[in-house]
Amino acid sequence: MKVYIDESGNLGGLGSKVSEEDPYFILAALITGEDLPIKRCIRDVRQTLKKKHRVLSELKFNRSSDPSKRRILECVAKTNSNIAYIFLRKDQAAFLSHYHGIEPQVLYNDLYKQLLYGVIHEYEFPQEAIEIVIDRFLYGAAQERFDNYLADGLMRSINVSHLDSKQCPCLQATDFIAGAIARKYRENDYLYYNKIQHKIIMALEFFESK
């Protein structure tokens, strides 16, 4: 059993006009017992692209056409997998007071921890260690500190892998899931969200979940 995690949005400009223009941060998890069907979803859509697009290093929600977005999300929704996510409204007064002056990485860590905590308590995982796969954004000692923070207090053994999404189709699929969820919140557009809604087992708002 693996949990792939990717995001949509960023934590920049908190409390500023930038926050008003991009008010949500989404962290999405794709929970799957078998990678191959997800990989096929990405492979099959890539093969439908024109040759000049087929050579792209990875498929991304924000750079893909509407037909590609629909095909990937519809394909993933047919696999034996589930989806969980947590979202943050960046303009919340509670958020600004609690995290004011604190390194943004602390908030990032807390979002990941809260998402994993919810997934583990919502989902019936086998007894072996849970495999967590994250799009690489940290290296060296910072990565080790992040992994230790995630594992602390979860009451379950986890193994964390940090991979380049260019070499990981399942992370690319998770990017499409995060993008579909973000469209719902940022633009009130349910077109893509509706294609995966029946696979969502958990949706948390960050402060309400704490």
Image (cartoon, helix red, strand yellow):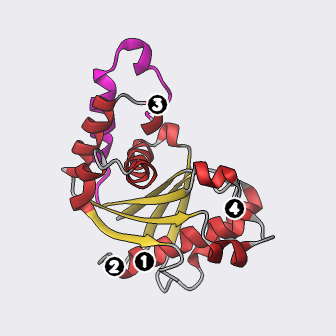
Q: Which residue is mark 1?
A: 118
What is the span of residues highlighted in magenta in the rendered image?
Answer: 33-59
Q: Residue at x 44, y 59 (%)?
A: 28
The foreground one among 143 and 208 is 208
Q: Which mark is residue 122?
A: 2
Q: Residue at x 42, y 47 (%)?
A: 187
Q: Earlier in the sequence, mark 2 or mark 3?
A: 3
Mark 1 to mark 2 CA distance (whole Å): 6 Å
Q: Earlier in the sequence, mark 3 or mark 1?
A: 3
Q: Amino acid at mark 4?
A: Gly
Q: Earlier in the sequence, mark 4 or mark 3?
A: 4
Q: Amino acid at mark 3?
A: Arg
Q: Nearer the viewer, mark 2 or mark 4?
A: 4
Q: Earlier in the sequence, mark 1 or mark 4?
A: 4
x and y, in percent, of residue 206 in the image:
52, 73
x and y, in percent, of residue 145 in the image:
71, 69
Q: Nearer the viewer, mark 3 or mark 1?
A: 3
Crowding at dot 1, Cα within 10 Å, few <14 / some 14-19 / many 20+, comes out as some
x and y, in percent, of residue 126 in the image:
31, 76
Mark 3 to mark 1 CA distance (whole Å): 30 Å
Mark 4 to mark 3 CA distance (whole Å): 28 Å
Magenta includes 176? Answer: no
Q: Amino acid at mark 2?
A: Glu
Q: Nearer the viewer, mark 2 or mark 3?
A: 3
Q: Classify residue 161 as left or right of residue 188.
A: right
Label 1 SS? helix
